[in-house]
Image (cartoon, helix red, strand yellow):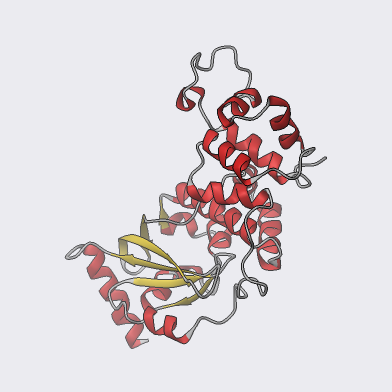
Amino acid sequence: MTAHDNELGAYLRASRSRVEPADAGLAGGVSGRRVPGLRREEVAVLAGVSADYYARLEQGRERHPSAQVIGAIGNALRLAPEAREHLFRLAGLSPLPGPDGPRDARGPVHPSLLRLLESFPKAAAYVLGPALDVIAANAIADALLSPFGTERNMPRILFTHPRAKDVFTGWEPLRRSTAYALRLNAGRFPDDAHIAGLVAELDAVSPEFRALWADRDVAGLTRTFKVFHHPEAGRIRLTYQTFEVVDAPGQLLLVGTPEPGSRSEQALAYLASTAESA
């Protein structure tokens, strides 16, 4: 059985490899261990299930775990909320979005959301689709992304665009968080052809993406800092907040704001003025 056939087992193995025994309250540290992380038997003890049952779950021989068992395993593996959600979904225990699925990643953004974007005159605001495409943006966000021409898919920009490393400071953490967010959405929307095609494309051309995808880690896009080196406006540091668009599963509203009175605020004002005069 391949990892593709047994995504749950592969995810469990990857997750337990990231847990230090001491962090899980186990004595003895890492002495004598050939591989990092927890052993199968230790996860089973922490979760309150038999070692044989847990082994069958990892091996794909047990396909119908209960929500109680999966919850206990998630606790044992110290999974963050998004990672727990992903675990439940892989176990077939989390419902998919409504019968019509998410809106197309390149599909329409509600007019009220478009108006909201323009209500941030001093911030970079944009909407991401399930494949992390920028499907709508205000003038400042468009100006920030102008070094990438017409490309508006964030994973493709970060892993394939020649200017990404020059524009983004903290490039590696940003690529990691983007890959993990894309995997989270791949689990949420398993029938999304746009996500599947993007993953296949990046897997073929980017060894860095391929390595991060093999981690099988997931994480949502949360509050973060981004530093841009814009070719016209210079260094810009923004604090980003992320909001889920409730009536469009898979769409996220991101708003990046500068520190009041900072040079970054002045730089955004300059970008806004150039956008107005364009």
Can the viewer see residue 215? no
Residue 210 horizontal side relative to residue 233, left or right: right
Q: Quadrant of residue 193?
A: bottom right
| Figure quadrant of residue 124 | bottom left
Identity of the residue drawn at 58% across and 54% down:
184
Spot occupied by residue 63 in the image (x, y as percentages of width and height): 76, 44
Question: Which residue is the extreme one toward the right?
Answer: 1
Q: Is residue 78 above or below residue 105?
A: above
Is residue 168 at least partly visible in the picture?
yes
**In the picture provided, is 126 more to the left or to the right than 248?**
left
Q: Position of residue 197 (x, y in %)?
A: 70, 63
Where residue 91 appears, x then y in whole percent? 68, 48
Image quarter where the C terminus lies is: bottom left
> Viewer-proximal residue, 94 or 149?
94
Considering only vertical position in the picture, is 20 above or below 244?
Answer: above
Give the position of the N terminus as an image quadrant.
top right
* Residue 42 in the image, given as x and y percentages of width and height: 60, 24
